[in-house]
Image: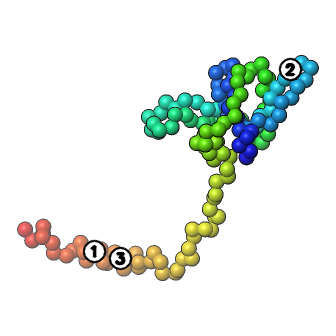
Amino acid sequence: MDEARIASIKLVTGEEILCLLIDIVESSRFTSVLIQKPMLLSKNTSRRSPNKSYQISNWLVTDDPAREFYELNIDKIIITTVITDREILNEYKKLFTPALRPRPNMFKKELESDIGYVGTVNEYRVKLEQIYNMDSYEKNN
């Protein structure tokens, strides 16, 4: 992910989005900006993480993950700024780094035939009856 292209865009709606700037497209009717992987940057109001002053979430809730580009009309943009804050850059990159997943058989061990076997039901029924019928302190008093 090219850090030079990660930018913050402030929209006229008040939203601030982090995204990858792809290109500026000019046509006879309007100019637009092509962006990729947009995420909403908002002020953190949670008391759970007081050391973080921001939070990053999905820009579009019903976003299609297969969609590669978004086109923003330049009239809807107030300002665009390249992100230089290391913490925000790392947090943004972490969202798009694939997580390592364990292989399905990674934690399975070969089971031995006697693991978990303590005896038959009848054997343990007899042992439990012996324990129950033992003289105890309460029966003697």
Based on the displayed image, in which of its 4 quarters is residue 81 positioned? top right
Question: Which residue ends up furthest to the right in the rendered image?
Answer: 28
Q: Nearer the viewer, residue 39 or 65?
A: 39
State which tag comes first along the sequence, 3 or 1.
Answer: 3
Q: Is residue 87 left or right of residue 130?
A: right
Residue type pointed to by label 2: Phe
In terms of secondary structure, where does tag 3 sit?
helix
Q: Are the residues flagged by discs 2 and 3 in contact, CB closer than 8 Å?
A: no
Residue at 78% from the left image edge and 26% from the top image edge: 72
* Residue 24: image location, x then y, percent: 83, 30
List the residue tagged with mark 2: 30
Horizontal relation, residue 20 to residue 104: left or right: right
Pointer 3 with pointer 1, Cβ within 8 A: no
Name the residue carrying label 3: 124
Q: Work out how far the residue at label 3 is from the one at label 1, CA to CA, in angstroms.
A: 8 Å
1 left or right of 87 in image: right
Q: Could you give the CA–CA distance between mark 2 and mark 3, rounded to whole angstroms? A: 83 Å
* Amino acid type at image mark 1: Glu
Query: Is 15 rendered above or below residue 138?
Result: above
State whether residue 95 appears in this view. Answer: no
Mark nearer the viewer, 2 or 3: 2
In the image, which disc is placed on residue 129? Answer: 1
**Residue occupying the point 25% across, 75% down:** 131
Out of 57 and 20, give the one closest to the viewer: 20
Per the model, the C-alpha gap separating discs 2 and 1 is 88 Å
For the residue carrying disc 2, how many other residues have a C-alpha within 10 Å: few (<14), some (14-19), or many (20+)?
few
Instruction: Identify which residue, 126 or 22, lies in the foreground.
Output: 22
Rendered residue at 45%/75% (across/down): 116
